[in-house]
Image (spheres, coloured by chain):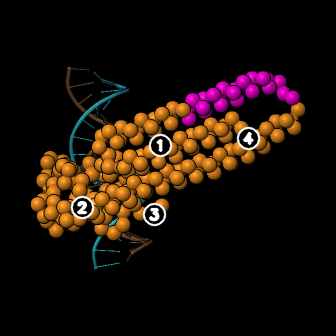
Chain colours: A orange, B brown, C cyan
Amino acid sequence: MAPVFSHGDLRLYLLSLLDESPRHGYDLMQALADRTGGTYTPSAGTIYPRLAKLEEEGLVTKTVDGRKTVYAITDAGRAEVAARAGELEGIQSDLADSVRLIAQEVRGSVREAMRSLRADLAAASKADRDAPARPHEDDERSAAREQLRRAEAAVTEFRTQVRADMRTHVARGGQLSASAVDAFIEAMDAAARELTRGLRG
DNA sequence: TGCACGGGGTCCTAACGCTC
DNA sequence: GAGCGTTAGGACCCCGTGCA
């Protein structure tokens, strides 16, 4: 998967997060994951060296609060965020695009999986027709119907959960654009519809 | 009730590979 | 060389559980 941030973008985005409120490193990782809908979770080895560099440049300060190291933006850092506001807007827009792209990838993967599943089901069905009648056949069909019912219920629950999660994310002030969220929901809905269709044959 | 222990969560560093 | 990213691992704290 392509890098979410291009050169220097992560640095600016971290500054913008700290501009909202002072945070500790782990909090920044979670904030980034949250704002990308969980599609991008930077590792510790990505965040801390960047924060150290920002501190070195005098754009942030750190305060050791017990076990935590809380980072806060300085006036110089705020000035940088203000000076590059346009650039920041572009980064946020790119982030939204990344989420949309990932949603498309998920949709593609589901479609691929369904193709394979249909082939498997067709093969199983043919093998079943070719095989001589066995005792307990009704039980097996009944079990298969029950399995299908459960799969459909799982799909419905998944769709509801994704929709709720994304709405909650926006309500909490997440910085994905509404259109990106809608695109993601639409992609997940389509994937779920496809899965249901596939299971029904 | 109190203690020991294990598991999970949080926070951080170090080393390294890859891309621009 | 700078910056993004992963993996590995250590230290600390909290909480649940089992046992005497």
Q: How many other residues sit within 10 Å of disc 2, few (<14), some (14-19) or many (≥20)? A: some
The subunit carrying tag 4 is: A
**Please, what is the three-letter code of the amino acid marked with disc 3?**
Ala
Which residue in the structure is indicated by mark 1? A185
Instruction: Kindly report which numbered mark, 2 or 3, lies closer to the viewer in this rendering.
Output: 2
- Per the image, label 2 sits on a secondary structure element best described as helix
Which residue in the structure is indicated by mark 4? A121
Tag 3 and tag 4, C-beta contact below 8 Å? no
Which residue in the structure is indicated by mark 3? A2
- Per the image, label 3 sits on a secondary structure element best described as loop
Which tag, 1 or 2, sits closer to the chain's start? 2
Res. A17 mark: none
**Same chain assignment for discs 1 and 4:** yes
Res C16 → quadrant = top left
Distance of label 1 from label 2 (alpha carbons): 29 Å
Magenta region? A133-155
Distance of label 1 from label 4 (alpha carbons): 28 Å
